[in-house]
Amino acid sequence: MDTWLTNRGFRQQAGGAIASATGVPADVSEAPVSEQQKQAYVVAADKPRILKIPSLGVEARILHVGITSNGNIDTPKNIDDTAWYNGSDLPGITGVSFIDAHYGGTSRSGVFSRLARLKPYDEVQLERGDGTTLRYTVTKVVEQDAAQIDMRRLLAAPGPHGEYLILMTCAGAWEKNSQTYSRRTIVVADRTS
C-alpha cells in the first residue's frame, strides 16, 4: 500500500509535467560511457540498472530521475544513458515503468536515436540491481506531438495485472523558440518473463 500511495503521489505531481526527453541541455555530456563504467554502475537490488535492446544494439545504464524544478520529468545527464522516472512503478511489479533518453546531442546520436525502428514483438531487456533480467515484448510504437502527450495517461497501466515498460525520446523537428523537438517517439512493451 505504501508503494502504491508513493507512486500515486508522484503520478499526480507528474500529471502536469510536459513530455520528457526534451532538447539536450548544456549540462548533458556527450562523452562516451565506457564498458567499465557500465560494469561498475551499482543500484539497489530492486531498482533498474541496465537497459538492453538487442535489435538496436543498445546497452545502457539506467539512471534514476525525478521531476525538475520546471515540473518536467528529468532526463539523463549523458546522451549514452537512459533514465527511469522514480515516480513510475519499479520494474518487476504490476504497473508501468517509464524510461526516457536523449535522441542525440550537438555532435552525435544519443542512445535512443533509433528507437522509432523498434517493431511489435521486438524484445527489450531490463536488468535490475540484483542481476535479475526482466524481458519485455514491444506491443506498440507511436510518434506523437509533444504538446499532446498526457503524462497521467501514459503512466497509467493499460491493464490491472500486467507489467509494462514505456520508452520515450524526441522526434520531429527542432523548435528553436522552445528549445525542444516537436514530437516524441513512444514505445510500449509488455513483460513476458
Image (cartoon, grey):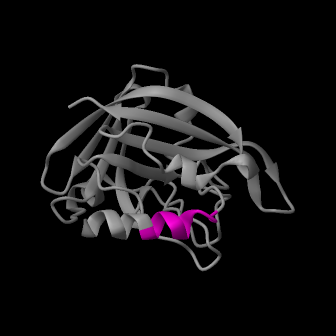
Q: Is residue 110 visible?
A: no
Query: Would residue 124 be found to the left or right of residue 152 on screen?
Result: left
**Residue 129: quarter of image:** bottom left
The front one of 152 and 188 is 152
Residue sitting at the far right? 177
The front one of 69 and 87 is 87
Tell me residue 149's x, y (percent): 66, 48
Tell me residue 37's x, y (percent): 29, 60
Measuring 51% from the left and 27% from the top, which residue is drawn there? 140
Q: What stretch is highlighted in magenta?
A: 9-17
Measuring 62% from the left and 64% from the top, which residue is drawn there? 17
**Residue 59: quarter of image:** top left
Q: Main secondary structure of the magenta part?
A: helix
The C terminus, quarter of image: top left
Query: Would residue 152 be found to the left or right of residue 80 on screen?
Result: right
The N terminus, quarter of image: bottom left
- Decide: is 12 above or below 182: below
Q: Can residue 37 be seen in this view?
A: yes
Tell me residue 187's x, y (percent): 51, 36
The front one of 176 and 164 is 164
Measuring 45% from the left and 25% from the top, which residue is drawn there? 139
Tell me residue 15's x, y (percent): 58, 62
Q: Does the magenta stretch include residue 161?
A: no
Measuring 46% from the left and 20% from the top, which residue is drawn there? 120
Question: Count the marks: how many?
Answer: 0
The front one of 128 and 89 is 89
Residue sitting at the far bottom? 69
Query: Would residue 185 be found to the left or right of residue 63 on screen?
Result: right
